[in-house]
Image: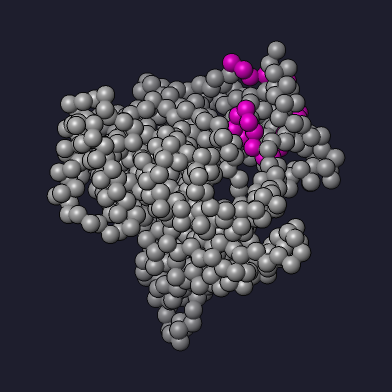
Amino acid sequence: MVVERINFLKDEINKHNYLYYVEDNPSIDDYTYDMMFAELKKLEEEHPLLKTPDSPTQRVGSVSEKFESYRHKYRLYSLDNTYDAEELTKWYERVKKELPAGSHPALDCELKIDGLAMALTYEKGVFVRGVTRGDGITGEDITNNLKTVKTIPLKLFEDVSIEVRGEIYMPKSSFFKLNEENKQNGEKIFANPRNAASGSVRQLDSTITAKRDLAFFAYAVIFEDAPNAPDNHYDALMYLKKLGFNVNPNIRLCKDIKGAIDYCNEWEDKRHNLDYATDGVVIKVNNFGYQGTLGYTARAPKWATAFKFPPEEVQTKLLNIENSVGKTGAITPVAILEPVFFAGSTVGRASLYNYEEIKRLDVRVGDTVVIKKAAEIIPKVVKVIDDGHHNERPVFTPPEQCPSCGGPVTTKENEVNLYCLNPNCKEKEIAKLVFFTSSAGMDMDNVGENLIKTLYEQKFIKTIPDLYRLTEKDLMQLDSIREKAAQNIYNGIQNSKKNPLNKLLTALSIRNVGKETAEILALEYGSIDNIMNTTSSELSKAANIGVIIADSVTEYFKNRKNRQMIEELKELGVNMTQDLSDRSDKLKGKSFVLTGTLKSMSREQAEEKIKRMGGKASSSISKKTSYLVLGENPGSKLEKAQKFGVMILTEDEFMSMLNDTQE
């Protein structure tokens, strides 16, 4: 009797979850649903042996120490891109040439969701595993987190064994809500819905994932044991919907490429009215038999392509031009805009680069301007729309003194930027603190720009060491910072003490010292004391970084205040060394470029090993490159390396070289 009741409740709740979250058509009221859920939960607590992984109660979440890597049973390929109707037509003509004469394959068109690709495994209708795309061959097992996503069914309406591909995303409305809550709690502000979804789905504590209101669209299926499996993609999507999956409602089956092009043109503007971000259209040959005939290249299916929407430009009003002071004292103009949503986020500020650019564009406060996102990330002003009143507005003039402290400003040789000369400038100090805590610097979790400004304004911090002196009690004195948020911030700061020396060197904002130079110095000298006590000429020769950078480093450490700050950080427990246990000069004089996906390690790990052995890791091929390391799905670098006669190493040969040098 208990078993039958539990099974009945599970089936009913799963059915109503589907109607509510997928069909958006609930058939019972919330109270009735809650009563069924409470009854099921009570019965499972009384009879724990009857609790199964497919139960709706298993969406509550748990805590993991780490995510295990998992090798995909079926590889996840990338997609080739097209950017206009002409390229789409050429792709379709190539497809037809590889099919039987006279073929005119129908095409399935789907909006390309701007989220994260997932592979979900179901055995006899039960969800057993969810894995991130990763490199397409190996991903991370995040099953517990995915169980919290309500549009991922835990039990299908048929007992089939399949692998479902789809996209995890965060609705725009949920994104705005999350950022507002995080702002109130002094926590991380996400740049766009995709970043928010990525950060949410990879939480070690899946109870946090459960609160983030993620959603899932299924877009492909591999049938292992499904008697009713369709023979084409469109019907397969309809079958997934029948099984209980959320399938995007805007898919369309087109009889030819003209219909597909019309679909792309239609959605270029309409997509902005959706509650999820899209960056293009995926177009697939519908017939599975044709797909098998066409096959794959080394990286992508020949039977599918992605049409990418052109970089978006929108018009808005320029409300003001602010002069921002950075960590080096550089003063740069920032456009303050009438907020406008485009390319996945709301934009209220945009780059004007420098005062020469303002002069070139003749930007004036009150103008209607066109903005677009460089690489779809950084908003920038690209032109002014003449509304008939442009010339009536005053011409913008650069500041004659620092907008923050009122101190003197100057220019530097061969630069167009203005610089504040006051070493105690408030905005300069805040900018240094913000950069020190950022992901590019010491990467302090839960510490953002707004928090730093508040702490500075309320005199809790003034210098970098002050960050490490903060207590949870200090943090809880700030408005909207409660005990849990204070604890997270405190832990984020304290955990950064363990970072290697190269992170600290980057975070200190030493002029001309970025990430690459910091790594060179850390690996060459091993400790901050060794760097501080080395002359400029020795630095430039030993580290091969050149005179300008060497002079910047020695000038920084000659400064009494900077040396005092380093001593304070030492006393506070901040690590000042680099692990050189596997450091050698065996690859000295050799330069490497990596292409494709390595199976044994990430590209970053491979580059780190090269540098630790004295070699140089570069991102581009030249005649001076010693080796090109060839991973899976290599790009255009292979052709360029062959042209220049660069020696090519397989991954096994590269690993043998590393192992030989370590002996």
Q: Quadrant of the C terminus?
A: top right
Count of numbered marks: 0
**Percent coordinates x, y for residue 623 in the rendering:** 81, 42
Q: Is residue 65 magenta?
A: no
Instruction: Name the residue nearer the viewer: 335 or 23.
Output: 23
Q: Residue at x 39, y 37 (%)?
A: 126
Q: Nearer the viewer, residue 143 or 254?
A: 254
Position of the N terminus by quadrant? top left
Decide if residue 98 is in sight here: yes
Q: Which residue is at a point 60% across and 29% down the rendered structure image?
A: 601
Q: Is residue 591 magenta?
A: yes
Which residue is at 42% across, 67% downward? 272
Q: Quadrant of residue 523?
A: top right
Compared across the picture, whether 252 is left or right of 662 comes to left
Q: Is residue 319 above or below residue 205?
A: below
| Colour convention | one colour
Q: Is residue 522 left or right of residue 273?
A: right
Residue 398 percent coordinates (x, y): 46, 65
Point out residue 38 in the picture as x, y percentages from the top left corner: 17, 39
SS majority, magenta:
loop
Residue at the image position 32 percent from the left and 51 percent from the top: 18
Is any part of residue 527 visible from this angle?
A: no
- Of residue 500 and residue 259, the one placed in the foreground of this image is 259
Q: Nearer the viewer, residue 535 or 484?
A: 484
Q: Quick check: 393 left or right of 600?
A: left
Q: Which residues are magenta?
A: 581-604
Where is residue 596 drawn, in percent x and y? 67, 40
